Amino acid sequence: MSAALPTTAAAKLPRVEHPTVEALRMFLRNPSAIAGMVILGIVLVTAIFGPLVYVADPFEIRAAPMTPPFSEEAWLGADYLGRDVLTTLVYGGRATLLVGAVAALLSVIIGITIGAIAGYYGGRVDALLMRVTEFFQVLPALLFAMVVVTLFSPTLVTVTIAIGIVIWPGTARLTRAEFMKVRGLEFVRAESAIGAGDARIIWKVILPNAFPPLVVSATLAVGSAILFEAGLSFLGLGDPNQMSWGLMIGSSRQYVLTSWWAVTFPGAAIFVTVLAVSLIGDGLNDALNPKLRER
């Protein structure tokens, strides 16, 4: 009888899920997050595989100028030059999403690096890096990006870099706060006591434990980068040789009353994409935040 007691007691212990599995389960139970994933998946599939299936030149004149939607020449209409809106919409999504993803990645790399160093070392290093962060934070972001693009000519590369270097301060502050919260915990002190170097403690010990909110920040940065690209292209500072949703809106803004479809459809694509990214970000925040998971 006594030998069977430990087995019985062990059988009654609740099974503990791995935090990653629990977060994934909570994310998949969020209807808004799933809707965002579906919408973003449709946009990505269209942007990636659309140009492979429907080979065309987005700058080609395919119909009469300002042809209305649902016509034989252009199903979604034509802009003021006669370019097919459907073709430009499919091809423009690739450049817009590429700029948004790469610019967000660049901003996350800059923000995490500066925030991690500032939060780990503190003191004068923290003060110096936070002053740099505040300098970029108080600058008019769109104006600063316009100056950078103007100085180095408007190309996809310069637009991506300009966006990346203006949207990183928020990530840097979040990373700094997470590092300051984690650096004093016992497991970090234990790593330091056994002789681990600063680089190992920063990147392999603290960063993985501070990663969940940074994932949410990176997701939302994609939406911000897409809006920035659209704003720069609307002002005529996008790459004129690469079709994008912002370029579609900017080139047809003078004809919005006579050919509304040339502005409405790319604007709707931007809105839907940013909404999907925001829904995914909210879902990740709910799934990765232990307090929200308990609630």
Image: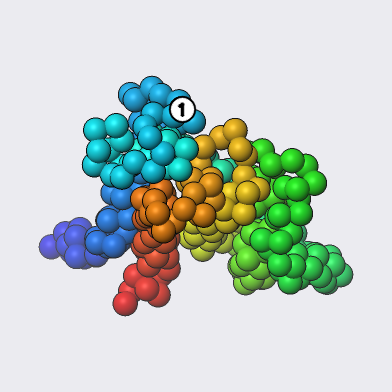
Q: Residue at x 64, y 70 (%)?
A: 177
Q: Secondary structure at mark 1?
A: loop
Front in this rendered view, residue 92 or 235? 235
In the rendered image, which quarter contains the N terminus? bottom left
Question: Badge 1, how many Cα within 10 Å: few under 14, some, many 20+?
Answer: few
Query: Looking at the image, can residue 49 be seen?
Result: no
Residue named by callout 1 = 60
Q: Position of residue 46 (x, y in %)?
A: 34, 37
In the rendered image, which quarter contains the C terminus? bottom left
Q: Position of residue 49 (x, y in %)?
A: 36, 29
Q: Residue at x 42, y 36 (%)?
A: 82
Looking at the image, what colour scheme do you see? rainbow
Q: How many marks?
A: 1
Q: Residue at x 62, y 62 (%)?
A: 171
Q: Residue at x 74, y 67 (%)?
A: 139
Task: Examine the image and state in which quarter residue 138 appears.
Answer: bottom right
Q: Residue furthest bottom?
A: 295
Query: Looking at the image, can residue 140 be seen?
Result: yes
Task: Examine the image and state in which quarter residue 50 appears.
Answer: top left
Of the residues shown, which amino acid type is indicated by label 1?
Answer: Glu
Task: Examine the image and state in which quarter residue 176 appears.
Answer: bottom right
Front in this rendered view, residue 176 or 137? 137
Q: With respect to residue 269, does 287 lie above or below?
A: below
Front in this rendered view, residue 195 or 138? 138
Would residue 272 be found to the left or right of residue 151 on screen? left
Front in this rendered view, residue 206 or 169? 169
Q: Residue furthest left?
A: 1
Would residue 177 be found to the left or right of residue 247 on screen? right
Q: Position of residue 248 (x, y in %)?
A: 49, 45
Q: With respect to residue 177, does 236 lie above or below?
A: above
Q: Position of residue 133 (x, y in %)?
A: 75, 66
